[in-house]
């Protein structure tokens, strides 16, 4: 088959490249026979004769005339059964290839979905990092402005340590201010009646969740406290397990400001206005209390003010005096303290026989109450700092305190799974609510008609008469323990926070 074409044998010549009878034979000048398409492809790349290795061009090839050879059919195609077998084999091969293509398509789709998921996750992380960067820039700008203003006035802002030796003591001016505030509030407060716009029992019974807002970080889920001012409807302040204090507008679904500086979870927050300033007080497990000032209204950046580092244990609560000039802190270090709103400590009541677990001012500021680790509630005189009364009845540490607006009643929550109501005029417990799980928070509405009890859900009660409370509604929308509640204007709304990281609005 490798011999050059011989005269008289054109039909038996074999291709030098394929070793088969060529369908379109050509010959080189040296007499070698090739299949035309094969030798042309070879010459495109090599440019030489594959047999002699001499220079050879396509134009040098000589076409040969040969008789067309009819290829015989394969033996399997010479009968109908054989052809059916061929068709079946071809069908099976097509089906196998189709199955393999489907598998390949599914694998490609899964890879594409995984890639898209990674891309989406990366975009979310980038967006979060950009938001945190922008917030950090805003905080730096605010701090720089505060520092510049302080330098101009000769005052040093932020992180002002209020150590024990800075306790200034109760002065005549402070006591006069306490008396003045109490006298002004006592008369009007006791005569105040619920307005016609106050929510009816039927309205509260119809409460449904009108909004859910996950405003704190998911890396440390849980909102531990909440506060609200009636003068700014829909705006609430929350403290989270993520160490952040946030001011949020529930109507606009917008975070108005975030305050960072605490190093451990926030235990209590309080919004107040003092001398035309919008302030936020916060307490934390990091043993400090902080004062934050809004730069220009609640919807602005917040500047860090003085830091109270008086306590050596968890600061479990903070409460503002109705005058707006003073606030109190309670701590697990077996003490509570009375402070001026500029951060100066006025008195420090230490060396108690129990840890303070909660603390609250009376509505006229004349008294204050502390919850204790020994299951008691202590009533103190704000001016003399002397113990006025002890209330016993709970079987677990006190977790929360709430005075009614008229000042007659005190609601207390305990880890023993009960909430109790006390008549302060008789210092007696006249009603007990048993919820079965630890009570995390109790909250009267502004006119003392409704009481919210927070545990695994929110149980709302209302006064049927002066000394009888009846169930109004139970709100079980949260997916974790409810840690705090605060009423809106005229008890037409209720804001709650939970370990499920949600701030929920009911109305």
Image (cartoon, rainbow, N blue to C red):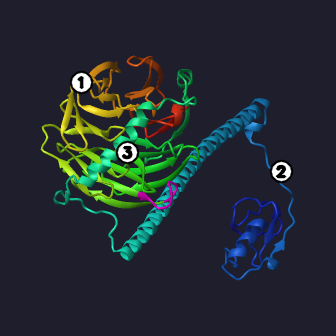
- Disc 3 crowd, CA 10 A, few/some/many (<14, 14-19, 20+): many
Q: Give, as a single range, the part of the protein colored magenta.
A: 293-300
Q: Position of residue 487 (x, y in %)?
A: 47, 35
Residue 192 lies within the magenta run: no
Q: As drawn, is 401 to the left or to the right of 66?
A: left
Question: Which residue is farthest bottom?
Answer: 55
Image quadrant where residue 483 sits:
top left
1 vs 174: above or below = below
Q: As drawn, is 331 to the left or to the right of 2?
A: left
Which residue matches tag 1?
394
Q: As drawn, is 479 to the left or to the right of 376?
A: right
Q: As drawn, is 17 to the left or to the right of 200?
A: right
The residue mark sitting in front, 3 or 2, is 3
Q: Position of residue 385 (x, y in %)?
A: 20, 43
Chief SS of the magenta region = loop
Residue situated in front as seen by the camera: 102 or 264: 264
Which residue matches tag 2?
70
Which residue matches tag 3?
322
Please report whichever mark, 1 or 2, sits nearer to the chain's N-terminal start. 2
Please report whichever mark, 3 or 1, sits nearer to the chain's N-terminal start. 3
Q: Provide the secondary structure element on which disc 1 rests.
A: loop
Please report whichever mark, 3 or 2, sits nearer to the chain's N-terminal start. 2
Q: On the rendered image, what quadrant is the N terminus found in? A: bottom right
The residue mark sitting in front, 3 or 1, is 3
Marks 3/1: CA–CA distance? 28 Å
168 vs 27: above or below = above
């Amino acid at each position: 088959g490798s011999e050059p074409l011989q005269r008289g044998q054109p039909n038996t010549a074999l291709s030098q490249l394929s070793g088969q009878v060529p369908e379109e034979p050509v010959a080189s000048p040296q007499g070698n026979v090739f299949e035309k398409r094969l030798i042309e492809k070879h010459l495109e790349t090599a440019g030489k004769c594959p047999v002699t290795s001499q220079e050879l061009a396509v134009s040098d090839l000589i076409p040969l005339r040969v008789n067309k050879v009819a290829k015989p059919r394969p033996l399997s195609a010479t009968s109908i059964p054989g052809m059916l077998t061929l068709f079946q084999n071809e069908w099976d091969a097509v089906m196998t290839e189709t199955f393999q293509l489907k598998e390949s398509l599914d694998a490609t789709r899964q890879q594409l979905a995984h890639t898209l998921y990674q891309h989406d996750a990366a975009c979310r992380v980038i967006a979060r990092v950009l938001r945190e960067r922008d917030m950090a820039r805003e905080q730096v700008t605010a701090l720089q402005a505060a520092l510049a203003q302080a330098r101009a006035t000769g005052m040093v802002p932020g992180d002002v340590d209020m150590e024990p030796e800075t306790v200034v003591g109760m002065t005549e001016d402070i006591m006069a201010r306490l008396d003045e505030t109490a006298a002004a509030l006592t008369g009007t407060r006791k005569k105040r009646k619920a307005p016609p716009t106050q929510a009816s029992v039927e309205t509260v019974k119809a409460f449904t969740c009108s909004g859910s807002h996950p405003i704190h970080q998911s890396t440390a889920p849980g909102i531990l406290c909440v506060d609200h001012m009636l003068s700014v409807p829909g705006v609430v302040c929350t403290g989270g397990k993520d160490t952040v204090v946030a001011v949020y507008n529930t109507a606009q679904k917008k975070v108005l400001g975030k305050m960072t500086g605490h190093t451990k979870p926030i235990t209590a927050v309080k919004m107040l206005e003092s001398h035309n300033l919008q302030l936020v007080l916060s307490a934390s497990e990091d043993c400090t209390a902080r004062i934050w000032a809004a730069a220009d209204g609640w919807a602005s950046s917040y500047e860090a003010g003085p830091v109270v580092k008086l306590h050596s244990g968890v600061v479990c609560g903070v409460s503002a005096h109705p005058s707006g000039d003073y606030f109190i802190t309670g701590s697990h270090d077996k003490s509570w303290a009375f402070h001026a709103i500029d951060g100066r400590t006025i008195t420090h009541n230490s060396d108690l026989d129990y840890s303070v677990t909660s603390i609250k001012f009376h509505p006229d500021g004349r008294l204050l109450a502390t919850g204790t680790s020994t299951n008691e509630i202590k009533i103190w005189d704000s001016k003399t700092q002397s113990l006025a009364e002890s209330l016993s009845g709970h079987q677990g540490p006190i977790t929360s305190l709430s005075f009614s607006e008229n000042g007659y009643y005190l609601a207390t929550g305990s880890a023993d799974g009960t909430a109790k109501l006390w008549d302060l005029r008789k210092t007696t417990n006249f009603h007990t609510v048993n919820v079965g799980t630890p009570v995390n928070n109790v909250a009267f509405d502004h006119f003392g008609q409704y009481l919210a009890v927070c545990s695994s859900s929110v149980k709302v009660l209302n006064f049927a008469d002066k000394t009888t409370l009846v169930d109004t509604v139970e709100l079980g929308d949260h997916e974790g323990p409810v840690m705090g509640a605060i009423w809106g204007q005229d008890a037409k709304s209720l804001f709650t926070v939970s370990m499920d990281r949600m701030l929920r609005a009911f109305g």
